[in-house]
Each structure stands twice: as structure tokens, then as C-alpha cells.
Amino acid sequence: VTVSNQWIRRVLAYLRRQPAATRSELIEGTGLNPACISITITALLKAGVLQQSGEVHGQSGRKRQVFRLSPEAALLVAVDLEGTSVRVGLTNFLVDIRYRWEERVSFRCELTTEDLIRGIGHVLGGLTEAERGRVLAVGVAHTGIVDARGRVTAVNLGWSDFPLEEELPKRLPVPVFFDRSGNCKILAERWNGVAQQSDNCVYVLAGIGIGMAAFVDGHLLPAEHRLGGEFGHLTIDPGAADRCQCGKRGCLEAIISSPNIVRQYLALCGHVAEAESFPADGVYAAARAGDGAARQVVARVAACLGLGLSHVVTLLNPDLVILGGDLIAGQDLLIPGIRAELGRHCLPQFLKDLEVKASPLGLDSGLRGAASLAFRGALENPQLLAKLVGAARA
Amino acid sequence: VTVSNQWIRRVLAYLRRQPAATRSELIEGTGLNPACISITITALLKAGVLQQSGEVHGQSGRKRQVFRLSPEAALLVAVDLEGTSVRVGLTNFLVDIRYRWEERVSFRCELTTEDLIRGIGHVLGGLTEAERGRVLAVGVAHTGIVDARGRVTAVNLGWSDFPLEEELPKRLPVPVFFDRSGNCKILAERWNGVAQQSDNCVYVLAGIGIGMAAFVDGHLLPAEHRLGGEFGHLTIDPGAADRCQCGKRGCLEAIISSPNIVRQYLALCGHVAEAESFPADGVYAAARAGDGAARQVVARVAACLGLGLSHVVTLLNPDLVILGGDLIAGQDLLIPGIRAELGRHCLPQFLKDLEVKASPLGLDSGLRGAASLAFRGALENPQLLAKLVGAARA
């Protein structure tokens, strides 16, 4: 019997979230039977995708081998298009970042395919021929909304129906996987961040726009390439004067995105600074210093974010809410307000085991997320699995 | 090679939602390879779980056999505990109801395990010994909230931490599967109702309480036995005076549940009728007759339900919203108002392919749903699969 792609997928997906595992942990964790696990381990060791990593000695006196993913089994390219920067990274198979390149995008100027190719070129430029051969796939994390044909509309990149998924793959020698920033970032949290133990978690990020992603019962929701999780466009305050860039009134985004936090603060305190040159963390700093206007804005942001999150909690029952993007800078001010609001709007059953935490991955979460997306995409792609494991299979 | 439970599960789960299928449709629909499908078809035909159902003649001139589930492969018992009745039904393997028994529950008097056993006894009483042997499982659809130990709190049944999942199985000779009404009803819609073509649908029902269930990318959400989808406890109007029985203000349930619809109507028009003796469809009838107070209440119900649904649509992006329970009686009045509200609060991308429909299954949806739950549970239970297919397997 030769190893099947399904077995390989299950073993790699399981080990992705574990530092290491014994044979019996692999059997339990993947649901595969002992014979399948043995065949798969043998093939993956032979291909250098798995490595033996010491032994454990059990109470019975029996030694058990421990396996883990080989960090150097492949290289992954990560592209993070959140905010107003293009960040490109090269990671190993465990999505540890080896090399970074970053360039600022002029706000609302259209980023081109050429710009992306140049950025990826910078990262691949320093590789030897042999290293290039080990590049498995590219993952791209982007903001905005994707249509059924893979065209992206994203304000921060100046894109309106930009044919990202059509153009970029034509110019690259390895497969490219695309997803929205929120989905990529929650993948990174599940692999390397605060959500390693959670199958039911929600990630909310604020910046120029708002992003959300959720795992429910271990499934990313909704599946890649389906619109959903438009947390920023929940109508939170139908009577509010704040108009969203989508045209509606009362959207959460019109209250809690970074430019809107700054807008509200400047309006309240009569400052004449340009909103675009004033960062949202300036408002958090002012609130910490006791500035009344800043405190008022931060309280409204926490209340509206808390009400929006109460809807998500009441519908999906996560055990963990992760705050990302510019919300991280305000975590000390926002989390108590969010918790108070959740207490006001959620049934106690939902709150018992619910944690609200800021992402610990910081600026790297986008790159790690994009690399995680590439890893995940590679598992589903028979050609890439063949490239990864091929030699050992024949 | 003997047939595996996984192959049987996939074939039965696929055929459950198809009237019939050819061998190549089974291969495509289950993702199993031709050899596995052949082994599985042979075993299921031999066990009488599948039957051949004619042939199709293709353009190539080749005849292809068509297979479907045998209606008499097994019997299922369905228990529906929605509202203030206990309904028990006996269905065949296709969840067609063969026999029904119904008893009213005194509102807020505690329903006992004894009452349930008596109801199930009525349904099983008329069966021959051989027929009893073909009863595979019992499905129970109930309202309320379940804790981690399977204890149910449900106002309509007078239950507070009632140990349903512990008590009932002790008294029955076949396995019992439990789930909340909303989840059961959406299963029925996916199998027999309006959601046969939809992997992304939401079911909302109103009665004494509010229920919700959702399929996202073909997964029931959240999984059985996890709290979630508490649509009725979304805070829709934080400033509202309406107090919910959960203690909060502004819950959707406090505005759109049937007793609350009647309460608002009686308060507006100064009637002194007892709310419990006045049905919600009386309010719909009055609105159709032009009664101003009734129209005002119906407009508020549609607006609040529409706003609540806009949150669900914005987060989950379903292609179908199904209205159930007492909402069915008001569908002509509610659906236009709901659609208008969705248009006000959702991005146009979410509305393009979204349908809002009333459930066509009516009173039987609970029984069919409970039977569907039993079917679904049986597929996951190795003992029951062995009972169903056992003879053919050895």
C-alpha cells in the first residue's frame, strides 16, 4: 500500500499545531489507523518532511520515538498587504520568518502587480538555485472584498476590482494562494499565537478598515473565497450620524476604524490636525494621560466594539476573542470596556469560558498568516504534495 | 477489502439528500474512488439498505443503474418537544412519517420522563415484533438551552436543568439522539424542504421563544451539543423598554416571540384579553384587516427581525433564510419588511443571491427534523451501522 494524500494531509495538519508527537499521539490526533500512520511516517521521514526528534521514556519502560515537521522541508513566500505597506517575507516550513522586505504604499494610489513581483523578487533574490527549488508556494494576505472572479476591492491599496488572483499567478513559478488578512491572521494565531488550544475563536482587527475571522468547531468560517465575516459592516447604531464609506449609517467600521477614531477625537477636541497624519494610538495615549475627549472616544469605541462582539458571541459561542491591528495598541483601555459590554449583552453561559486577548504576534502576524495560508494551500494541492513528498513515494 | 464505516457514511449521507443516484454520481458526490463505491454499493444492496431503482440510458447508449435508499431499511422514532405539545412520530428510513401521536403539555408544568416514555410507547405499541426489531434510533428535538451535562432548561416544558440526556436513554432499548429544535428543523429543510440545494442557509423560528440554526459551507453551526445561535438574545434595541425573560433589555426575543407580539398588540389597542389565550396569528389577521395597532406591531417585528438577520447575513453570508414556527403564519406581512431592512443594513454583495422563504414543512418539520437527527446520529454510531449493514458485512 502506498501512502495516500489524505494521510499525508492529516499528519501534516496535525503536526502543524503541535511541536512534536509520538506515533500513538499521531494515531489519536489524526483518526488514522496504526498501519496508515506507519506508512505515512516512513514516507515523510524518507522525504525529509518529518524528522525524528528524540524519544520519550514511558512508565512502562518502553521508549517511544517523537516526530516533528522538518523546519527545512520547504520554503514559503508570504505577502502581507494590510495597511499601507507591502511586506514580503520568506519563511521556513514552520513559518518562522527568515527574511523580510517592506515598502510603503502611497495611500489610495493603486498598487500594481509589478510592485508585488518586485517585492517578491527582493526576497527571492538572495537565494541559491537549490534554495529556490525548495520554495513551495506563495501566500498573499490582503484586505478588502473579493468577488467571485477573485477581483479585489481594497481602499488601502487603491484597488477597485483589481484582478489579483488572475494576474499574480501568471508571473510566478510556484502556486499562489490568496485570502483576506483576517483569515490569514487567525491561521497564524492557531499555529503560533494565542489560539493554539482553541477550535472556537474569533479574530477582530481594526486599521483603515475592519477585519474579522472565525474558527467554529475547527472550521474556518466561512470557507476561503466566500464573502462573510464583514464585522465592520454590522449596523451597530442605526441612529448614528457616522457615515461609513460603504454608504450606510451606523456601521461599526464608521466608529472603530483607526481613521474614524481619530476623526471623532479631533472633532471633539477641536484640533485642526490632518486625520491622516495623526495615528490612532495617539488617541489611546491621550486617554491614558487623562484627556477627556480621548476618554470619551475610547469609551464609545469599546462600547460599540463590545456590542458588535456580543452578536458574534451570541451566534458563534467562541471561547476566545483576539484583538488585532491597531486595537493591540489600545488593549489596556479597550478590553475592560469590551468585557463590560459583553456582560451587558450576552447570556452568562456564553461568558463563563470566554477570554478576550490581544494578539501577541504583532507586526509579524500578517506574514506568518500568509505563510500559513501557503502551507495550508499546499496540503490541498496534489502537485505540491507530490513535490514535497514525491521522491519518497515512488 | 471489506466495506468501511466511513464509506457507508458518505454514501448514505449523500443519498439522504438525493432522490437517487448513479454509480458515477456517487463517485463524484462522495469523493470516494470507484473501487470503494463498488464495494459499498454491493454491501448496502445485500443488506437491503440500498435498492436499485431503474436505469438511465445515456447518449452513449450505455445503461446505467440508479440507486436509492430503501424506504424500509429501518424505522426511526421522532420526538418533537417544541411549543406546548409533545409530538411523537414513527418514520421510515426516508423520514416519511407513518404514525403520529400528540399530547398537549400544560404550560409551565414540568413534563416528565414518564410522559415521554408513554408517548413513545403509544407509537411503538402498534408494531409487530419484527417491526420493533427494525427501529434503529430515537431522535428528540427540544427547545431551550442545554448545559455541558445534557441538562435542559426550557420554559415551555417547565424544565430547569432537566436531566433529559441522562434519563431518557436509560428507559429505551435503542440509542437516543438529542438536539435543539432549530438544528433539527434545518436538517429537515436540507433533506425534505426548501434548503435541498443550499449549503449556506439559516433557519429562524419564533414561538414561545426564538430558535436559530445555520449551515455554513455544509457544516451545522455550531456543532450539535454546543451552545450558539442564540438569535433571540441578540441585543437589537439597547434602549428598548421590553424586558426579556433572560433579564436583559432589548433582546430580539422580547420583541418578536409570539407572546411578546401579542403583549405589544394588546398594550397598544387597550384590549384586556389574556395574552396566553390570544394567538400571534390573531395579530397577523388583524394587520391584514387594516387594524392600525396590529400593523404597527407587525412593522416593528419585521424591522427588528430584519436588523437581527442583517447581523447573521453580514457574518455568515447565507444564500437562504428560512422562517419557521409562528413566523410562517405572518410570512406575507413579514417578508417584505425583512427584505427592506436587510437592504438597509447589508452590503449589496450579500443580498444579490439571498432568498427569504417560509418553511414549507409546517407542523411536521419538528418530527421530520427529529427523525433526520436520528438518521444522522445512526451514521456516526458504529453499533447502529453494524445493525443496519451488519448481515452483509461478514
Image (cartoon, coloured by chain):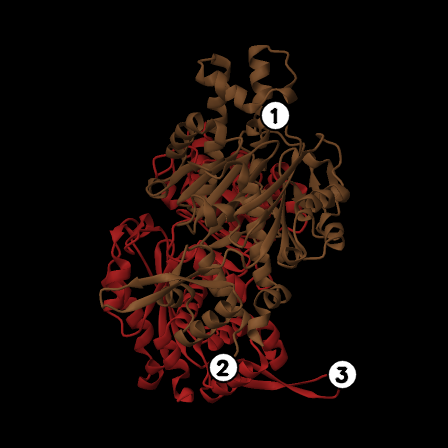
Chain colours: A brown, B red
Q: Nearer the viewer, residue A14 or B266?
A: A14
Q: Which mark is residue B35?
A: none
Q: Chain of mark 2?
A: B
Q: Amino acid at mark 3?
A: Gln
Q: Chain of mark 3?
A: B
Q: Amino acid at mark 2?
A: Ser
Q: CA distance from mark 1 to mark 2?
A: 62 Å
Q: Chain of mark 1?
A: A
Mark 1 and mark 3 residues within 8 Å of each other at the beta carbon: no
Q: Which mark is residue B70?
A: 2
Q: CA distance from mark 3 to mark 2?
A: 28 Å
The secondary structure type at the circle numbered 1 is: helix
Q: Residue at x 59, y 65 (%)?
A: A385
Tag 2: Cα neighbours inside 10 Å, few (<14), some, or many (≥20)?
some
Q: Estimate the x, y position of residue A350 in percent, counting from the top left.
A: 37, 43
Mark 1 vs mark 2: give the one in front.
1
Mark 1 and mark 2 residues within 8 Å of each other at the beta carbon: no
Residue B17 placement, left or right of B280:
right
The secondary structure type at the circle numbered 2 is: loop
Mark 3 vs mark 2: give the one in front.
3
Residue linked to disc 3: B59
Residue linked to disc 1: A259
Q: Estimate the x, y position of residue B322 in percent, counting from the top left.
A: 54, 53
Q: Is residue B331 visible?
A: yes
**Residue B132 versus residue A306 in the image, above or below:** below
Mark 3 and mark 2 residues within 8 Å of each other at the beta carbon: no
Residue B162 placement, left or right of A386:
left
Tag 1: Cα neighbours inside 10 Å, few (<14), some, or many (≥20)?
many
Q: Amino acid at mark 1?
A: Pro
- The quadrant of the rendering that contains the C terminus of chain A is bottom right
